[in-house]
Amino acid sequence: MQAGPEQARWGWIESAVLAGYAVVVALGIAWHEPWADEAQAWLLARDNGWWHMMVHAIRYEGSPGLWHSVLWVLARLHISYAGMHWVSGAIAAAGVFVLLRWSPFPLILRILLPFGFWLAYQDAVVARSYVLFAVLAFPASAILRAGARAAPGQRRLIALAVLLGLMANISVHGFISSIGFAVAAWVLLRRQALARHPASRRTPVLVLCAFWVIAIATALPPADVNFAAGSNIRRTEERVSARLGDTTAKTQLPGKPETGDVRPGELAPIRLLVVHRTPVEAFWRRIARILSLLTYPVSRFRWLALATCILIVAQAIALRPGPGQLGWIGLLPWAIMVLLFASMYMQPRHAGMLWESEVAALWLTWPAAPAAGARARWLQRATLAALILCCLDQVWWTAHSVGGDMRGPYSGDVAMARFLKARGPGKRIAGFYYHSIGVAAWFDHPIFFNQPTAYWVWSRRLRIDQEAAATIATHPDLIVVGEWEWSARNGNISDDWSPIDPRELHQVPRNDLYRIVPYAEAHGYHITHRFCGHSFMRAGYAEELCQVALEPNR
């Protein structure tokens, strides 16, 4: 990629920004204590052969396997669980380098954007697959913008196809954004063809479709999945099949992952509250969700965030495409993701990909030259001012989160691992709930006798929590229960525009759905230790993450 005339050359300011970014991320990683989602991907990669992982194990995750493949290589290079985070930080820094070197933004935005919460903390310090999005989306944006200045060559189109194909293999979110980028590229190539600058598309299309097929094949969940995202994908597949006339799918449509399927001798789950809403209430909640998808990743000040999104869209539509500027089609990588997740659940920690896709949309639509006319100049200045305010808000989120990591634990996993190691070998330890595997990542062997693997298998066939009574009857030396608790602040994306219902927020205290802790206490055990941390999100925290140790009464 060659820097265009509109783009700043690399200088001491960019070097200072990248160095400062590296320091911020390094401080966060040095103090960060990972949690269960980070451990799950690591354990899957560490404990499986690559082929088995890709064709079987990750299908229970509801996600393609690009990140798991990266971790599989790291594990074979004998990089530790803690070392994984430094690799994540290096990948994040690579994405920021592309942003600083090739983005068309004014200097003030290129200085502030890297220090925002999603780029500098949530998708960098926290080692998840989402760290791969910026390092793929930003080069794709640079290639597309260069293609709007001059007809792209075959090599550049193939490089774009590879970037978008890898992006589709990050997660469902990445797959959706990949489609948005691909549609934008298709429209751009159509424009080039009409301008008598045709480009051969066959090879890039074949490359991209091959990556898409791999993403779908590895993410398509099996029938017995009980992971929320996997269940959503499975139900969508059944609805499509039913509409196409598949009678088997029609009979399966009513079926959902059951929490009330209680077998003899098993613990019964807490009955969840069913909130009945009128059609009008349901409509307004849907509107609130769409608004939240726009504003949650951008700023705590929702009206500022909404105004910023409106200005971004207005600028893309009002300013006609020019050399290096795609116009409204550049909004697609962001807009398609917003539209799809209006009807699919998205957790707060996934919202960084919404923000980064919005930055990519800005990249593709940012004016290539100063606007002509007072109204256009006003629109540009207003958009820039709103973005600066949002970036400053996000810089505060980053400072809050990194400072919080330095002051206290993010989770209770490390403390519980140290506690178990201090107890010595030979203990029979039972572990319950998904979050318990955050402890297992700190051991080189499975530590819970009642779990078949060190990682969690999201299958309805495994009834680890439901069978807690039978497990406790074998008198384990230690019981570990992974807990978490929503905070009233930042508990859900939709809470930006719809009030939190306290009944829904706390209906399962400490997420002990099967009341395993009270059952153990009633059958000869008592809590001896509870190690907790706070999962930071924006300027507050989303969850309290705890590990509870119960030991026999003496």
Image (cartoon, helix red, strand yellow):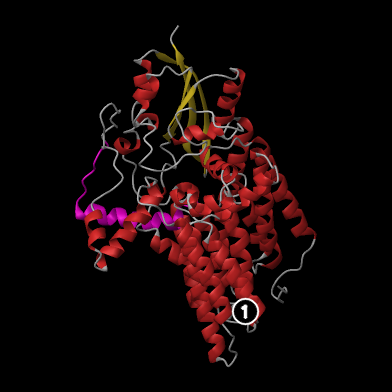
Q: Nearer the viewer, residue 550 or 215?
A: 215
Instruction: Kindly tell me whether residue 242 is visible in this rendering.
Output: yes
Residue positioned most to the right: 12
Rendered residue at 73%/49% (across/down): 20
Question: Which residue is identified by label 1?
Answer: 147
Q: Nearer the viewer, residue 143 or 156?
A: 156
Is 241 placed left or right of 199 in the picture?
left
Query: If the image is split into quadrants, where does the N terminus sit?
Result: bottom right
Amino acid type of the residue tagged 1 in the rendering: Gly
Vertically, is 226 above or below 386?
Answer: above
Q: Is residue 223 magenta?
A: no
Q: Position of residue 270 (x, y in %)?
A: 29, 32
Instruction: Kindly tell me whether residue 312 is visible in this rendering.
Output: no
Residue 484 placement: quadrant? top left
Which residues, given as a range, are shown in magenta? 272-299
Is 4 placed left or right of 372 in the picture?
right
Number of residues whose C-alpha sits closer than 10 Å to that of mark 1, classed few (under 14), some (14–19) or many (20 or more): many
Tally of numbered discs:
1
Q: Position of residue 280 (x, y in %)?
A: 22, 55
Label 1, secondary structure: give it.
helix
Q: Is residue 281 magenta?
A: yes
Q: Position of residue 310 (x, y in %)?
A: 45, 65
Residue positioned most to the bottom: 196
Rendered residue at 44%/48% (across/down): 60
Q: Main secondary structure of the magenta part?
A: helix
Residue positioned most to the top: 554
Query: If the image is split into quadrants, where does the C terminus sit?
Result: top left
Rendered residue at 40%/50% (across/down): 229
Is 31 placed left or right of 211 in the picture?
right
Q: Position of residue 382 (x, y in %)?
A: 54, 65
